[in-house]
Amino acid sequence: MLRRQFLATGGLVLAGLASPAILRAFAKIVDIGMRSDEDGAKVWFDPIGILIEPGTTIRWTILENVHTATAYHPDNDDHSLRIPTAAKPWDSDYLVNPGDHFEVELTVPGVYDYYCAPHEQAGMVGRIIVGEPSGPGALPFDYFKSQNQGWEEVPDLAQQAFPSIDKIMHDGVVRV
């Protein structure tokens, strides 16, 4: 057997034996910074909008201040639903120290809107589009009122801070 044939055969055997955990280690990870100016007067996610493929892991990392990465979902303090209905909501809880991080793998296509719990009123929000835009996050912010849902509304300043779906689809990545 030639060395090249041996290596190719061995590589296929190893690939076939690779566990899902090992394969996930090679999955794409996208980093989103959790930012603040020196005095904490301005807070933001960097990037604020991003287009990704299903199966991508998002990692939010504290760079300054104290933040959360929290999905707009009724399970999170009765916020309105702004992620795909089949997606699992998340809440990082408070991340305090620079370098602290939180990860979520997003597999369901659609629009995912999220916020920082202590800074939502200041407009610290972000939007992720997985694959193609769809779901509650692609609807107007008040869509749920016609369904008689008693969910919390997205604050006006937060609504204004979201990048448009069209801009994310066109640019791929949107920064503040």
Image: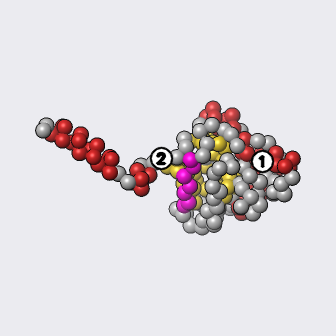
Q: Residue at 63% of width from left, 55% of height from top?
A: 88
Q: Which residue lies under the disc numbered 1?
A: 159
Residue 13 position in % (x across, y down): 27, 46
Residue 14 position in % (x across, y down): 29, 48
Q: Residues within 10 Å of mark 1 (few under 14, many from 20)?
A: some
Mark 2 residue type: Lys
* Residue 18 inside the magenta-drawn segment: no
Question: How far is mark 1 from mark 2, CA to CA?
Answer: 29 Å
* Residue 105 inside the magenta-drawn segment: yes
Q: Residues within 10 Å of mark 2 (few under 14, many from 20)?
A: some
Residue 43 appears in the picture as rendered: no
Q: Is residue 152 above or below residue 171?
A: below
Q: Which quadrant of the structure image shows residue 116?
A: bottom right
Q: Which quadrant of the structure image shows residue 151?
A: bottom right
Which quarter of the figure is the C terminus placed in? top right
Residue 158 position in % (x across, y down): 76, 51
Residue 95 position in % (x across, y down): 60, 65
- Magenta residues (range): 101-107
Q: Determine whether the residue tagged by mark 1 lies in a helix, strand or loop.
A: helix
**Nearer the observer, 82 or 114:** 82
Q: Which residue lies under the disc numbered 2?
A: 28
Mark 1 residue type: Gln
